[in-house]
Amino acid sequence: MGRKKIAVIGAGKVGATLVQILAYKQLGDIVLWNRTVDKAQGIALDILESAPVEGFDVKIKATGELADIKDSDVVVITAGIPRKEGMSRDDLLAVNAALISSFTEGIKTYAPNAVLVVVTNPLDAMVYLTMKKTGFQKNRVIGMAGILDSARLREFIAMETGASVKDITTLVLGSHGDTMVPLVRHTRIGGVPIEDIVPKEKITAMVERTRNGGAEIIKLEKDSSAYYAPASSLALIVESILLDKKMVLPCSAYVEGEYGINGIFMGVPVVVGAGGIEKIVQLNLNDDEKRDLAASAEKIRALVSQMK
């Protein structure tokens, strides 16, 4: 069998960093599509010139033609206008909806059997739009958000406690926005509930910092939103798909009754394998968690309704 083929739509900072990580992991040959072809060509050449040093052996093709993504196994959509300081993810709705709509037909035509992974904000609405525009089955359209939000919370816990991030487990569900739902009750440090180790007020502060994780980076960098951690999170999904790892990951998935919610994309734990989302994992939530998740779902639903 030949190598797997991965298409990355958008050569911004997230897309470029993702290509670098995918190349280092040698998960397959890569096509980097961008409207400004010269930029994509420069990024591809720069990464390829690191191959003799890093020891990876994959092909990277830069292009402005969607036909070049033909027969891709995975298509990752990173294209979109990033947030600026003072903006919420929701402020990007109209402009990024128009942008995604401009190339979904090409994806449908040239990569009809691919699994689609979306990171464009506002995430949950953009994943919904991608599924509707392409007509792909719900299991083959995935939004990356919960992995990133969970990683941020894990890192903040590590900073506070000095514990290794490898020993910290947590899940952040719901929307990729102000109403995200960090599951504190399910958070462990070396198997021990975080509430047995960290004072409640510090847990509350870390949860709030997680909700504002992207805004914090924008405020610090001034001219850029986050891209290293988002790209790493995307690469994890691609790896689980192409290697059929069946990892349980928090992703934006289309729910049809799971958690009592229907007809939207939202962050839930899912099994990710060769078929995309192979199963939605149903956790036993308490009444407060159910209430918060329902409120998050309504925020997503209201955002989606603005596109109709």
Image (cartoon, helix red, strand yellow):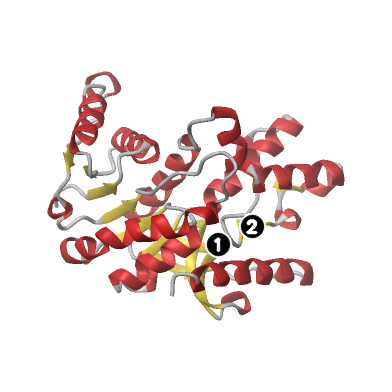
Q: Position of residue 234 (x, y in %)?
A: 42, 47
Q: Amino acid at mark 2?
A: Met
Q: Position of residue 290 (x, y in %)?
A: 71, 71
Q: Is residue 307 above or below residue 157?
A: below
- Helix, strand or loop under label 2: loop
Earlier sequence position, callout 2 versus callout 1:
2
Residue under circle 2? 180
Marks 2 & 1, CB-CB < 8 Å contact: yes
Whole-Å distance between the Cαs marked 2 and 1? 8 Å
Q: Looking at the rendering, which quadrant does residue 180 occupy?
A: bottom right
| Residue 52 marker | none
Say which of marks 2 and 1 sits in front: 2
Q: Is residue 88 left or right of residue 42?
A: right
Q: Looking at the rendering, which quadrant does residue 244 occupy?
A: bottom left
- Helix, strand or loop under label 1: strand
Q: Position of residue 288 (x, y in %)?
A: 78, 68
Of 102 and 130, nearer the camera is 102
Residue 75 seen: yes
The residue sitting at 60% across, 62% down in the picture is 174
Of 118 and 58, nearer the camera is 118
Of 193 and 46, nearer the camera is 46
The residue sitting at 30% across, 23% down in the picture is 54
Q: Is residue 174 left or right of residue 208?
A: left
Q: Position of residue 87 (x, y in %)?
A: 56, 46
Q: Looking at the rendering, which quadrant does residue 39 occupy?
A: top left
How many numbered markers are drawn? 2
Residue 190 seen: no
The residue sitting at 34% across, 52% down in the picture is 77
| Residue 267 marker | 1
Q: Is residue 195 left or right of residue 74?
A: right
Check the picture and name the quadrant holding the C terminus.
bottom left
